Image: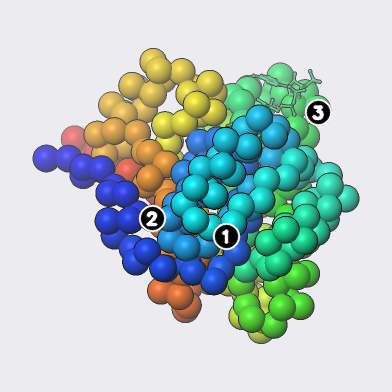
């Protein structure tokens, strides 16, 4: 017996779950971010996507518009605070509001700690942690001013909970992301803004397969997971949609692993 697949969100959630909301998803042109962007549109939200490459963004923006909602695609390097401020301005100019932020842009490679260069550390921690902070602060300023609350979801990773070989930069960055979400949850509750972390385990995307390769993926399934498959972007979509919706009105500062049981202890038998 296996867990099976997470069904498409349209089979589970109401079509109008997010009608009236405006979501910004960083890294929304590929992988998990693309799946999130299309799902948010399926459920009625206007959707902005932002990353460094317009080539990644443009086709997804077209697909979002084909679903009958408004789309905005804007380039940004999330490591640059001024560029992030400009991204939020563009979203507000083009879509008129910003009520949901998904900090999804990410970067990773596997490296022994002792050979990791200072620049290698910065490229990953800068994207994951500085990027999440820059976007949260810029979007948060608007969310506070709009006086109607908001939802912030940050993509963490299971490597934030347990140190793991070759993850010095990525694990430390993702641990910082969750801690930041908890602090934001505490500080901005008074404005009706909720902040939560979704922590994928190993989700089959082009990005992660570049990092780990097929042979390592097979070993992970065999040795590290309770589930009998890697995760899919759809597995992450349903949790993020829930956290973005009124169904999660009392949920803030929380950590949701989407990991097929990766964080469970291995069997002693
Ligand atoms: C076994 C289980 C694995 C599961 C992992 C689960 C945890 C998280 C997973 C994910 O996040 S998956 C998503 C991953 N997606 C991406 O990484 C896509 C984006 N990736 C990138 O943009 C690049 O790969 C990047 C290197 C992360 C960043 O590129 P950027 O253009 O900013 O930097 P570069 O100029 O290319 O390099 C900067 C710096 O980093 C060093 N470096 C790059 N790759 C490696 C490597 N494989 N090993 C060691 N060092 C590396 C590079 O040499 C540069 O340093 P200096 O040479 O200038 O010192
Ligand atoms: N897949 C997995 O197994 C896991 C993923 N995660 C996390 O989930 C999220 C999505 O991962 P996944 O879909 O696999 O990754 P992808 O590699 O597909 O996506 C990463 C995205 O981030 C964007 N991006 C990278 N650097 C920057 C930057 N400096 N500024 C703006 N955008 C940037 C990229 O777009 P562009 O190149 O156009 O800039 C790309 O769209 C990430 O945060 C990742 O760390 C966590 C654990 C496991």
Callouts 2 and 3 close, C-beta under 8 Å = no
Residue 84 x/y as whole percent:
79, 51
Local secondary structure at mark 1: strand
Q: Is residue 94 above or below residue 229?
A: below
Local secondary structure at mark 3: helix
Q: How dense is the environment of label 3, judged by Cα within 10 Å: few (below 14), some, or many (20 and up)?
A: few
Query: Which disc, if any, is residue 46?
Result: 1
Query: Which disc, if any, is residue 238?
Result: 2
Local secondary structure at mark 2: helix
Assign the N terminus to one quadrant of the image. top left
Residue under pointer 3: 118
Looking at this view, name the residue that lies furthest to the top: 215
Left or right of residue 159: residue 217: left
Q: Is residue 235 above or below residue 221?
A: below
Residue 48 x/y as whole percent:
63, 53
- Between the residue at mark 1 and the residue at mark 3, the CA separation in whole angstroms equals 39 Å
């Amino acid at each position: 017996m296996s867990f099976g697949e997470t069904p498409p969100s349209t089979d589970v959630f109401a079509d109008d779950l997010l009608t009236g909301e405006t979501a910004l998803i960083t890294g929304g042109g590929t992988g998990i971010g693309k799946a999130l962007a299309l799902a948010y549109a399926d459920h009625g939200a206007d959707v902005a996507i932002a990353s460094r490459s317009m080539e990644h963004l443009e086709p997804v923006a077209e697909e979002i518009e084909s679903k009958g909602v408004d789309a905005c695609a804007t380039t940004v390097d999330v490591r640059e605070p001024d560029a992030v401020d400009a991204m939020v301005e563009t979203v507000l100019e083009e879509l008129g509001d910003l009520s949901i932020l998904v900090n999804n842009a990410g970067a990773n490679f596997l490296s022994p700690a002792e050979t990791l260069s200072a620049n290698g550390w910065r490229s990953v921690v800068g994207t994951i942690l500085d990027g999440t902070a820059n976007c949260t602060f810029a979007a948060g300023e608007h969310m506070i001013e709009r006086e109607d609350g908001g939802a912030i979801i940050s993509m963490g990773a299971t490597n934030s909970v347990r140190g793991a070989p070759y993850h010095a930069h990525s694990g430390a960055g993702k641990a910082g992301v969750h801690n930041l979400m908890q602090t934001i949850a505490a500080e901005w509750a008074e404005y009706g803004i909720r902040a939560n972390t979704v922590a994928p385990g190993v989700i089959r995307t082009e990005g992660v397969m570049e990092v780990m390769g097929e042979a390592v993926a097979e070993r992970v399934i065999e040795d590290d997971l309770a589930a009998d498959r890697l995760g899919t972007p759809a597995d992450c979509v349903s949790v993020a949609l829930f956290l973005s919706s009124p169904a999660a009105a009392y949920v803030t500062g929380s950590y949701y692993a989407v990991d097929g049981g990766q964080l469970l202890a291995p069997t002693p038998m």
